[in-house]
Amino acid sequence: MAAEAPILDEFRRLRARVPQLTGALAAGVDGLVIAHDTPGVEPDGLAALTAAALGVAVRMTDATGRGDLRELLVRGTDGYVATYAAGHTAVLTLLATDRVNVGRLHLEGRRAGARIGELVDAEALPVRRSPAKEPARPMPTRTKTARSARTTANARTTNES
């Protein structure tokens, strides 16, 4: 995937802004890994679990009338797993220690998710070719019909009283 290198660059910038991050993964909503930086965590398993959690979270937001899923946060005794929407076909999952500033995690995760979504969505768009142009049709010809003469003697305008 051509977007993998720019996504890995985004992961590096994200880790610089949020030092408590311990891993980052971009995956398709189908559970396939797009790019990962997850030392000590198997990326395929994390992507599959993310897709499963995403499915439940989407159903929950639908059932409660909360609109489209934006993010999902899970807190364990040793840290956080945060998943953010990344465009139309991907998600960003971040792993962080329990010392992370959750507000900062959300701020940076949302921004990174938007950038990654742009990269993934741009690659997913099919190349559009312009349709073959049809030869120009001649314009229809108009024929004039004779009009009857108007009489203006009895006509009133809006300015007359």
Image (cartoon, rainbow, N blue to C red):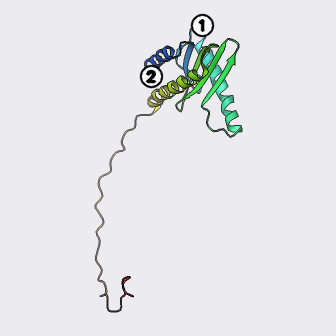
Q: Quadrant of the C terminus?
A: bottom left
Q: The residue under label 1 is which amino acid type?
A: Gly
Residue placed under numbered mark 1 in the picture: 40
* Residue at position x 34%, y 45% in the image: 132
In the rendered image, which quarter is residue 158 located in? bottom left
Q: Is residue 34 above or below residue 122?
A: above
Characterize the local packing of mark 1: few (<14), some (14-19) or many (20 or more) Cα atoms within 10 angstroms: few
- Mark closest to the chain's N terminus, 2 or 1: 2
Q: CA distance from mark 2 to mark 1?
A: 23 Å
Residue placed under numbered mark 2 in the picture: 3
x and y percentages locating residue 113 in the rendered image: 52, 26
Q: Could you tell me if residue 36 is visible in this image?
A: yes
Characterize the local packing of mark 2: few (<14), some (14-19) or many (20 or more) Cα atoms within 10 angstroms: some
x and y percentages locating residue 88 in the rendered image: 53, 33
Q: Is residue 64 above or below residue 110?
A: below
* Residue at position x 40%, y 34% in the image: 127
x and y percentages locating residue 80 in the rendered image: 64, 17
Disc nearest the viewer among 2 and 1: 1
Q: Could you tell me if residue 151 is visible in this image?
A: no
SS assignment at label 2: loop
